[in-house]
Structures are given as structure tokens and as C-alpha cells.
Amino acid sequence: MRFRPLFIQLAFVSATTLASKSAQAGLLGFLGDVASISSAMSSKGGSVLLPDYELKVNQQVQKTLKIQGYYTGAIDGNLNTYESRQAVMAYQKAADLEDKMAPGFFGGKSLFHAGILDDNSKQDLLYYYELAEEFEANTFGVFQNQPQLKTLQKAAEAHEKVLTDGDNTVLSDSMQKTINASKRNELPVIKLNALNDQGYVVDTANGFVWQDKNLPTAVMSYGEAEKYCKQLTLDGINKWILPWQSRLTNLAGQVDKGRTKLIFTTQTPVDYVWSTDYRSAYRLDNGEYVNRIRSTAAVRCVYKY
């Protein structure tokens, strides 16, 4: 049985629904005939007059509330609609936030406001969303990383205990069902090393899958390189980034000790490639550092697994 790469968003799940499996659902599909979490993640609603960053954060909060089953409205980034406020209040009640945010010993004012999230609560929800997104990225497509699935499931389980004292375990339960399915070979397992023959180079020392196909044919500025990786999609995967400068700093030592040997089949226009530091480029054959501040370098994006 082949499942499409979809998260399943839960609303109200009955025992009958739990017993049914949807052939159209991917991740979390074992929970029955309900809308997908993946579609919740990609939903777009009307625009709101907010700075781009704040809008994105609010949209991710709405997506998280949708995953948890509290929210059914548009993913528009507006947390002040009736539906958004009701969803936030439902989450606050489940998380018992009113008691948790009561004034402390020093007479401080309670941070709790019904229907409004404080910054800490937002960060808790954003982390929940990131766990869901990372699990999806590690479950489907050519970069399935089977050992990481259980780690993420345990992380979601632990975070649910923090959020709602374990009363809402929709994500960790669904992750576990997906892991069980993959063990039964209902989901394909693709070994990382097999990617070496598919236009990628696996770097186990640094936890990178290096791009080795569809490379830019010209050098780029740092800003252009960062934008290129952010917009890159290969084999359905769009989580590409520039290689971490902190990892490349150790590359020369790794090469000398034989821990890393990066062999690429596709060449870049110059030998050195950008890292996450706008001043730093590196040669990947020997780890040599090249200062490229206010200049150009080649681009070879990585997927961090």
C-alpha cells in the first residue's frame, strides 16, 4: 500500500472513525476520514496587515491549532477572528494555562488573557508545528530517515505532556501509527547511502545530504545563494539550506583524518562554496577557508538530516 505524503488534521475522532483507514491519507491516515494535517500546513487564507515575520508566525500557530483539532478556519495569520480566538481559548483550557500563568510569589500580574497567547505559549505551539513538519519531511520522499522518526515521535510525546499534560496526544499517536506502518513495509524505506547514486552526496560526518545535480552554473553573492537554496526543490524536497559554517570549519580536520571524503560528479563554476556565514566560503575537497566578504562564490545546497 502506498501512502501520499500527507499529515492528517484531527477534529473529532470517534471509535468508528479510528477503525477505518483512508487510502488517500498518508501520515496519520490511520485515524480515518478526516482532513489532512499536510493540507492544514499548506492552507492559505486572506491577507492581514502584519509584518511578514509576524504573519508567518501567526499562520504557523493556526496550523498547530488545526493539527490539534481546535481550529477549523482559514490559515490567514489573523489571531483576532472569532474562530481563532475560540481555538486559542480551547487550547488554553486544555493546557490549563490560566492556573499555570497565575501571579507568582512577588505579586506579579498574571499573563493570562482568554483567547490571547503570550510569547512563551506561542513558542510552545511553534515547536509543536516544527516537530510535525520535520516528521513529515523525514517520512516521505527520497530523504526518509527512518531512525529519526522515533526520536521525533518521542519529542512530540514529551512536548504534549508539557502543553496539555498529555491530554491531547494527536500528533505523537499518529506518528507512532506511521512508524508501525513503515515497520510493516506499508511505507517505503529508502537508505541514505542509496542517495549517492541519485544526484546527491551523503555526508555522514556532518549530517548533510549535499546537492550534486541541477547546480547553478554561475557564481552568486551571499544573498543570492541564500535565496537560491531557500527556493530550491529537488525530488519534492524543499528544505534546502546553505551548509552550516560551524560544520565546514571542521572540514579540513575531517578530511585529514579520513572521516570525510566528499566526491562530487557535478562541478561548480569555482572550487569554493558559500556557507551560512556571509564572509565564509570553503573548498570541499580539502576544507580550505576562503574569505568572500562582499564578493561571490559557488553554491551547493545541503539537506540537514
Image: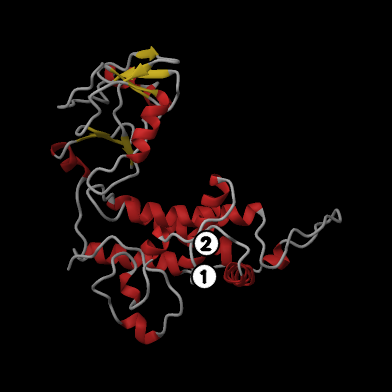
Q: Nearer the viewer, residue 77 or 171?
A: 77
**Label 2: which residue?**
62
Residue drawn at (34%, 40%) of the image = 231
Q: Are marks 1 and 2 in contact (CB under 8 Å)?
A: yes
**Label 1: which residue?**
71
Amino acid type, label 2: Gln
Residue drawn at (33%, 78%) of the image = 33
Q: Nearer the viewer, residue 61 or 21?
A: 61
* Quarter of the image where the C terminus is located: top left
Q: Position of residue 58 (x, y in %)?
A: 55, 55
Residue 203 visible to an observer of this rendering: no
Q: Position of residue 179 (x, y in %)?
A: 30, 62
Q: Residue furthest bottom?
A: 16
Q: Is residue 152 above or below residue 207?
A: below
Q: Nearer the viewer, residue 221 or 274?
A: 221
Mark 1 residue crowding within 10 angstroms, few (<14) / some (14–19) / many (20+): many
Residue drawn at (23%, 65%) of the image = 3
Residue drawn at (52%, 65%) of the image = 65
Q: Is residue 291 above or below residue 136?
A: above
Residue 43 lies left or right of residue 163; in this view the side is left
Residue 234 visible to an observer of this rendering: yes
Q: CA distance from mark 1 to mark 2?
A: 7 Å
* Quarter of the image where the N terminus is located: bottom left
Amino acid type, label 1: Tyr
